[in-house]
Amino acid sequence: MRLTDEQLASFRRDGFYNVGRVFDEAELAEIGGEYDRLVTTDSQTLGNDRDGRYPYRAMMQFRSPVLRSYINHPALIELGLQLVGPDLRCWWDQGINKSPGAGSHIDWHQDNGYQSGSLPEYLTFWLALDDSDLENGGLLVVPGSQASGLRAHELRGVHWVISDIDESGADEPGAVSLEAKAGELLIFSSLLVHKTVGNHSADRQRRAWVIQYARGDASNAETGELYDNRAWVARAGQRVEEPWSERRFDLAHNALDEG
Ligand SMILES: O=C(O)CCC(=O)C(=O)O
């Protein structure tokens, strides 16, 4: 699918857009099944003991051939080609299940804040596998914040967070709730300022599969590293049938992942 001119203008202005459903019921059931197998408390948890922990799993594309087959799904690639450019690598993916009662939040950040050096702006897909809102750990975003570029981040625990936002819970001026229904796909700029709140519901899990795409020539302006360990999913405007990379991705030495 491609965004219309109006949708594109909205995305460029706000830094996010809810594109609705791009997967059918059978695909969502297949993704959900693999997700539930992989994103468990036996994998890794995020959050803290006081507020409640929840399951997390990084780079599921390397843990499940089924999920890997979705990272070059035609619907995602068409959007990636439209929004990022003709050469695309899958930069990162992760499963985050804010389970009921897990009150820990993920503080204000921009996804680019997780990289040392400077990686060009990239594209985040946030696939809601359950309805998501502010009761069950959903997203708060600051519309238009991507236009001001990358803010300074600092590492708190395993998360990179915007340094000059205090953690008192006060929300950024202009922040709005970005809700999604199960099966809907949100897209946002890697420079969009956002956070997710804790899940304060009694029985509503909030599963999301986050998949990110960067330009094929993305390199780190500070370190010079070429990200050729990220899988090609499109080249010269064409979807790649079998994602591949020049260099192996090392699961054991990557942020947020304990191997
Ligand atoms: O889904 C979440 O709870 C956090 C998502 C997020 O902030 C991110 O992927 O950058």
Image: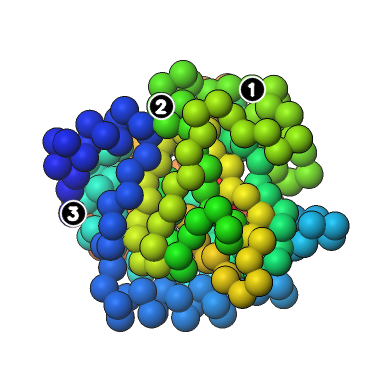
> Residue pushed farthest left?
5
Residue type of the residue flagged with mark 2: Gly
Q: Which mark is residue 182?
A: none
Residue displayed at 36% across by 46% down: 187
Left/right of residue 106 with respect to residue 168 in the rendered view: left
How far apart are the alpha carbons under marks 3 and 1?
Answer: 35 Å
Depicted 65 relative to depicted 58: above or below: below
Q: How many marks?
A: 3
Do residues under tags 3 and 1 come within 8 Å of each other at their CB atoms?
no
The residue identified by callout 3 is 1
- Observer able to see residue 56: no
Read off the residue under disc 1.
152
Q: Is residue 109 above or below residue 136?
A: above
Circle 2/circle 3 CB separation < 8 Å: no
- Which tag, 2 or 3, sits closer to the chain's start? 3
Calculate the distance from the C-alpha at mark 2 to the C-alpha at mark 3: 24 Å
- The residue sitting at 65% across, 72% down in the picture is 202
- At 35% from the left edge and 60% from the top edge, which residue is drawn? 184
